[in-house]
């Protein structure tokens, strides 16, 4: 029989209601510090993720996060703006759609609430690994805006808006608006 390692739980009943922070191979002893108890969205963001998702904080000052109306559980699109000094002409384009908001953080890193005296600073979003890479590049090379949306994965992204087609895009949207969506 193997020796009992320090900190190992003596009874499996003590694991009830807790979640392993990493995979536990069959037969391996479980230590107390390897288990966590999810306690709401701010404490348990990792427990809200599917196995192929990651949680990523995206800068979302109030003017970029639907006027401070962003809340956990909502779905958002991320719009990217780059100026003309980076990779060609200035452009605005929807990068990602239908991302779930896991939490809204304040400037001190805590969960933000409408009653808070702090200003919201980041939206923590559930993203795939590729979406995390896309967002990282976008944040590093331009500005991102978080837009509340209904979750509609079948909505087609536009071609993006540049100085050369800004008014064409406005006219096209106006045409759609006048004739109904």
Image: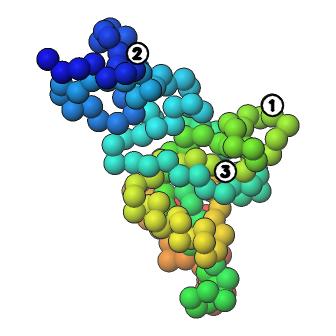
Spot the residue most to the right: 117
Give the side of residue 60 with respect to residue 3, left or right: right
Which callout, 1 or 2, points to the residue nearer the camera?
2
Spot the residue most to the front: 3
Label 2 or label 3, whichever comes before in sequence order: 2
Give the color scheme: rainbow, by chain, secondary structure or one colour.
rainbow
Q: Secondary structure at mark 3?
A: strand
Instruction: Kindly identify the residue that appears in the image at 27 percent across and 23 percent down.
Output: 29
Q: Secondary structure at mark 2?
A: loop
Give percent across and percent down for residue 177.
61, 64
Spot the residue most to the left: 1
Q: Secondary structure at mark 1?
A: loop
Classify 108 as above or below 41.
below
Give percent across and percent down for residue 118.
82, 41
Classify 82 as above or below 36.
below
Instruction: Kindly identify the residue that appears in the image at 51 percent across and 31 percent down.
Output: 44
Q: Is residue 117 visible?
A: yes
Give the side of residue 2 with respect to residue 62, left or right: left
* Residue at the disc numbered 3: 122
* Residue at the disc numbered 1: 115
Quarter of the image holding residue 35? Answer: top left
The Cα atoms of the two marked residues, 3 and 1, are separated by 17 Å
Label 3 or label 1, whichever comes before in sequence order: 1
Q: Is residue 149 visible?
A: no
Instruction: Kindly identify the residue that appears in the image at 71 percent across and 58 percent down.
Output: 64
Quarter of the image holding residue 42? Answer: top right
The Cα atoms of the two marked residues, 2 and 3, are separated by 30 Å
Give percent across and percent down for residue 178.
62, 65
Label 1 or label 2, whichever comes before in sequence order: 2
The dot on residue 17 is 2
């Amino acid at each position: 029989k193997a020796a009992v390692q320090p900190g190992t739980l003596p009874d499996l009943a003590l694991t009830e209601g807790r979640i392993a922070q990493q995979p536990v191979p069959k037969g391996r002893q479980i230590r107390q510090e390897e288990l966590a108890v999810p306690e709401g969205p701010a404490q348990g963001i990792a427990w809200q993720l599917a196995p192929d998702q990651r949680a990523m904080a995206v800068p979302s000052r109030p003017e970029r996060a639907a006027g401070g109306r962003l809340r956990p559980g909502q779905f958002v699109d991320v719009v990217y703006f780059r100026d003309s000094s980076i990779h060609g002409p200035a452009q605005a384009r929807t990068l990602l759609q239908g991302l779930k908001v896991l939490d809204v953080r304040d400037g001190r890193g805590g969960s933000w609430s409408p009653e808070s005296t702090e200003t919201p600073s980041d939206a923590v979003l559930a993203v795939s690994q590729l979406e995390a890479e896309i967002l990282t590049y976008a944040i590093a090379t331009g500005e991102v805006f978080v837009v509340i949306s209904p979750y509609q994965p079948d909505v087609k992204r536009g071609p993006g808006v540049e100085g050369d087609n800004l008014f064409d895009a406005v006219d096209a949207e106006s045409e759609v608006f006048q004739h109904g969506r």
